[in-house]
Amino acid sequence: MGIFKIRADDFSWITGKEDDPSDHCLHGHVTVQIGQTVLEDDGTVSATALYLLKSLTEDKIMNDSCIQMIPCCGFFMLANPSLTEVTIIGCDSGTDWSVIHEDGRVKLVLESGETEYVDFADYQAEVFRFADSIENFYRSCKPKEIPDDSFERDGYTAFWNEWHRRRNGGN
């Protein structure tokens, strides 16, 4: 079956490597292997992890109106009314691919059109490993300050609510 591997390192906050309790978006260097193709980019790894978790139950199709799988930035978090899901919006820079569910597999399609089929269980294990590595980094840092602004607070709350629901098997 196909190959999908993703790693992140060189973590930082928008102000740099020093821990910043007021910054909610973790950045880093991402290396992803899809089939024989290796892609590397610097981006918002917290958004990457959440969108990978979303891709376990939802197709994610590359297009100009959706955030990339490795977005340059994710500066705007829009919570749904129940604070159970968040839409992350950033700039139009980043690295993207499509994830399409087919018969117990995921079809990964690169911008070049190259396609790789990966067994769903293998894909899920790699997504969980990646998401766990990002959450573990958050846990190693000082607790994040909860924003006073209700819009920002709701976005951040919905981000983690959705993350934990999806990571723990909820759709």
Image (tube, rainbow, N blue to C red):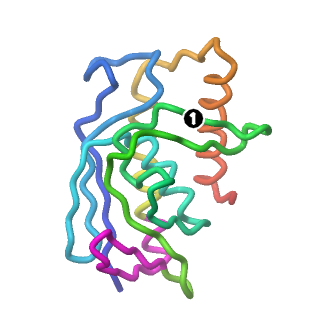
Residue 165 colored magenta? no
Residue situated in front as seen by the camera: 132 or 93? 93
Measuring 46% from the left and 31% from the top, which residue is drawn there?
75
Q: Which residue is mark 1?
A: 77
Q: What's under tag 1, amino acid-wise?
A: Met
Measuring 45% from the left and 49% from the top, which residue is drawn there?
49
Left or right: residue 38 versus residue 65 is left
- Image coords of residue 61 (percent x, y): 49, 67
- Image coords of residue 82 (percent x, y): 79, 39
Q: Is residue 169 above or below residue 78?
A: below
Dot 1, how many residues are within 10 Å of its Cα: few (below 14), some (14-19), or many (20+)?
Answer: many
Measuring 43% from the left and 31% from the top, which residue is drawn there?
25
- Image coords of residue 34 (percent x, y): 29, 71
Measuring 45% from the left and 80% from the top, which residue is drawn there?
119
Residue 113 colored magenta? yes
Regarding mark 1 in the picture, which secondary structure is present there? strand
Q: Is residue 71 above or below residue 169?
A: above
Magenta stretch bounds: 106-125
Residue situated in front as seen by the camera: 47 or 94? 94
